[in-house]
Image (cartoon, rainbow, N blue to C red):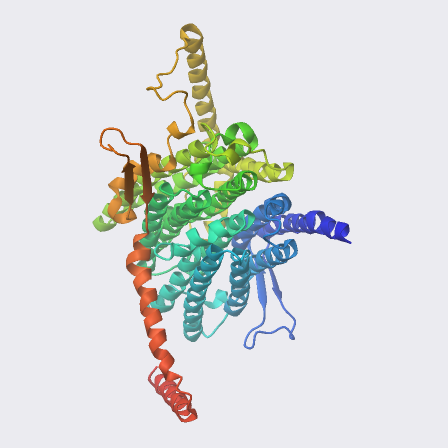
Amino acid sequence: MLKYRNIIILILVPGLLALLSCFGVAAAFCGWSHVAGWTAPPPVYLGVCPVQMRLDSLAAIFLLLLSLVSFSVSLFSPGYLEHLRGRVSPGFYWLTVYLFIASMAAVVLAANALTFLLFWEVMSLSSAALVAFDMTSTQAQKAALIYLGATRIATALLAAGFLWAHQLFDSWAFAGWNFGGPETLGPSVLIVLGFAVKAGLWPFHIWLPYAHPTAPSPVSALMSGVMIKIALYGILRLFAFQSGASLEIALLILFLGTVSAVWGVLFALVQRDLKRLLAYSSVENVGLIALGIGLYLYGHHCGLESIAAAGAVAALFHSLNHGLFKSLLFLGAGAIDASVHTRDLSHLGGLGRAMPWTLLYFVTGSAAITALPPLNGFASKWLIYQGLFQVAVDSGNLVHVGLAIAVIGILAVVGGLALACFTKAVGIAFLGRARSRAASEARECAPPMVLAQGLLAVLCLCLGMGSPWVGRLLSELVSGQFSQPFVPELPMVNLALALLLVAGCLYVAALARTERSLKKYCSWECGYGRLNARMQATGESFAQPIASLLRPVLQYRMRAEISGRDRRHFPEQVKAEAGMQSLLESRVYGPLIAAVRWLSAHMARLQAGSIHFYLLYLLVAVVSLLVAGVVL
């Protein structure tokens, strides 16, 4: 009996998920050229409207992303679950993963507000269960509570915004909503903030660095690669491809996107936990996608079609790109965790020799996320720059021109910091000498886990090389919004060939010079003996100059202890420990939670145990609602 159960869990269940993912890919390609709708039969009803689904070209993009990542997860998960044996039930894992993936697909296909909210809640609760998979861990319990709190706030904001929109338009169907008028500013703000919480935009990103380190790596790939994009899909669906939005909403999204990009990369740079680093990097990249959406809304509002088209294509393309290379990086982190049983960079090192395939794919994902050509991240970020340049050139408002130039400068800094961040991740984890015994005994992960990473790495390369073709397809999608859309095309193939030629020439020149002048010397050891792992650069030392420069934002602290009788001249032991705390957590969310606890403790006195008081509360509540209904 146990044998058959293992066969089902290790082969049949992931195989079924892979098959369903292939069907999802096929449905996405069909939905690109055909619009399909489905309404549930009358017994299945949501009180005031039916369950309705609609597949069009916009939904097809995100359904394709979900299907590709789900296929990779189906290959990766069986080997990864061996690493979690005894800590998580495979049956519970697969049941919740199936529910999570199905609910994400249903959210993408939802055609009205109530259907959307129903499956949004299923998506939130199933992902929260996966975050809390190991309830014996205090860290997992805390992460699950923080994530659940964020999902409750997001759902409350969305529900309020949807109810307000229904009151304005007298319809639950998304097709009947139009947020272009000034009277829709209120519900627009609520809906955008609700999606911003779920997407992890600043300042609502707090849940990401808690949820991702505790969730299994395949789940982190689904959450960061797909789930947070679905929140951005909601903004695209209701505002970008539905009716547009006011200038205030466009500037709000631009502001949140810019701050998220800067904030995320700064905190990613100083992380020791590899998955926590990737979580903060997701904050940066959702900020870049929000920038693209903001550019679209700004161009649409001001009648600048070239800016709007570039922003829309950039947002869609980077959503697809980030979903692929961030899923690849999370699977790479999972392969490291399964082999070394730690994600702490200070305990890694030298993994490149033991895990060459994981090194290759992790470097590919890192190059893509840092926008190095010819990979896909370069193409979509280039479109964002093009949109900002066009704002600076075509906009007649001097304030907006100045803001565009400032954002271009900020993005250039963000790109440099992202390159430093992933140079640190690759260099500390894979290069040099092993910093722990577990790292020295590491082995390459199982072949299906390698295959899952390889599939995503190949997709990153193909999307990069095929970016002109993908850009034209996405331009066709947004062409219905403009009379003459123009999206600048990047000659990626020519650029890749030029880079390959330059790299080859440099390699041949360096090889020839090395053969002529190669000399061997004993390294100068300063009296310490042979080189060892402690002499290598650490993650803290790599990030320390930038962290010290931005000390007020990062709350960065370095504490050093020097011990010994004559510690000034002959120290016997030196310890240095770096610490960092989020400014938002210490100055905003911490005091806010303390205030809520204080208020909750005092409101408990209302439970007096008297039926008369409870009847009085009901009377006051009913009268207040009646007065509010009359006034509003």
Left or right: residue 503 compared with residue 602? right
The vertical placement of 187 against 492, above or below, is below
Q: In this view, does 50 lie above or below 329?
A: below
Residue 567 visible: yes
Left or right of 605: which side holds 448?
right
412 sits to left or right of 132? left
- Image x and y of residue 118, in percent: 54, 67
How far from the left and from the top, in percent, is residue 438?
52, 36
Among all residues in the image, which is located at the extreme top?
516
Q: Quadrant of the N terminus?
A: bottom right
What residue is shown at x 29% (from left), y 47% (from top)?
Answer: 554
Q: In which quarter of the image is residue 522?
A: top left
Q: Which residue is drawn at 52% across and 70% down?
A: 114
User: Is residue 485 among what the camera can see?
Assistant: no
Residue nearer the viewer, 114 or 281: 281
Residue at point 76%, 51% (across, down): 4
* Residue sitting nearer the eye, 459 or 546: 546
Image quarter (top left, top right, bottom left or bottom right) of the C terminus: bottom left
Residue located farthest toward the front when viewing the structure as drawn: 565
Taking the view exactly as shown, the residue that stands out farthest to the bottom is 612
Total marks drawn? 0
* Residue 18 point in image, percent of width and height: 66, 48
Residue found at the far right of this picture: 1
Relative image position of residue 484 (x, y in whole percent): 42, 47
